[in-house]
Image (cartoon, rainbow, N blue to C red):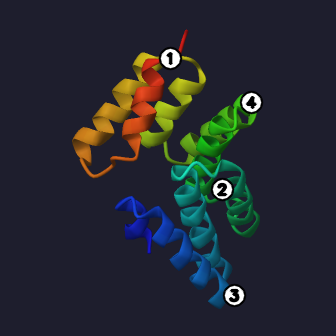
């Protein structure tokens, strides 16, 4: 199911993750399922719904760094800058090499060059990370 998100098939990912959530009772499985569904919802512009799923993922697995990173992006999209920075720093503490979150923290701090550099590097390493393209465009318009 996560490959559906990676392929940008977000509607299908939301549906598949919803079915898996309905069938599972294992918090070790449910946390990533909620997190992946949150990311797919965010990519479709459904940030309010995504936040509910990211919060649920973190309720189930409070130290899941991927969910902290996802919630950081959601908070930024909702213009909750303080919460976005908090979650981004917590995610980066657990996975300091995350170019996704390095770029987001730079964006939060209004360092558009830093965000563009991190995300460009990620795209060079992983050309399929096309979900970064609209965020790169946003970064170009951030005023310091």
Please say if 114 is above or below 4: above
**In what element is the residue under mark 1?**
loop
Residue 12 at what x, y percent from top left?
Answer: 47, 72
Along the line of sight, the residue nearer the viewer: 61 or 70: 70
Q: Residue furthest top?
A: 144
**If you read the primary sequence from the N terminus, does the residue marked by circle 1 or circle 3 appear first?**
3
The residue sitting at 63% across, 38% down in the picture is: 77
**In what element is the residue under mark 2?**
helix
Name the disc covering residue 50, or none. Answer: 2
Please say if 35 is above or below 26: above
Instruction: Determine which residue is flagged by label 3.
Output: 25
Instruction: State the separation of the CA atoms marked 2 and 4.
Output: 18 Å
Q: Residue furthest bottom?
A: 23
Image quadrant where one finds the C terminus: top right
Please say if 79 is above or below 127: above
Instruction: Determine which residue is flagged by label 1.
Output: 111
- Whether pointer 4 and pointer 3 mark residues with C-beta atoms closer than 8 Å, the reply is no
């Amino acid at each position: 199911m996560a490959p559906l998100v990676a392929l940008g098939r977000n509607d299908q990912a939301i549906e598949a993750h919803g079915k898996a959530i309905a069938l599972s009772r294992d918090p070790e499985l449910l946390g990533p399922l909620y997190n992946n569904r949150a990311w797919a919802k965010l990519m479709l512009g459904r940030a309010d719904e995504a936040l509910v799923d990211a919060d649920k993922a973190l309720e189930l697995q409070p130290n899941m760094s991927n969910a902290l990173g996802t919630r950081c992006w959601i908070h930024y999209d909702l213009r909750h800058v303080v919460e976005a920075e908090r979650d981004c720093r917590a995610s980066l503490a657990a996975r300091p090499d995350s170019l996704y979150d390095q770029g987001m923290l730079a964006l939060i701090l209004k360092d558009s060059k830093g965000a563009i550099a991190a995300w460009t590097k990620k795209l060079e390493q992983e050309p399929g990370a096309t979900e970064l393209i609209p965020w790169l465009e946003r970064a170009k318009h951030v005023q310091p």
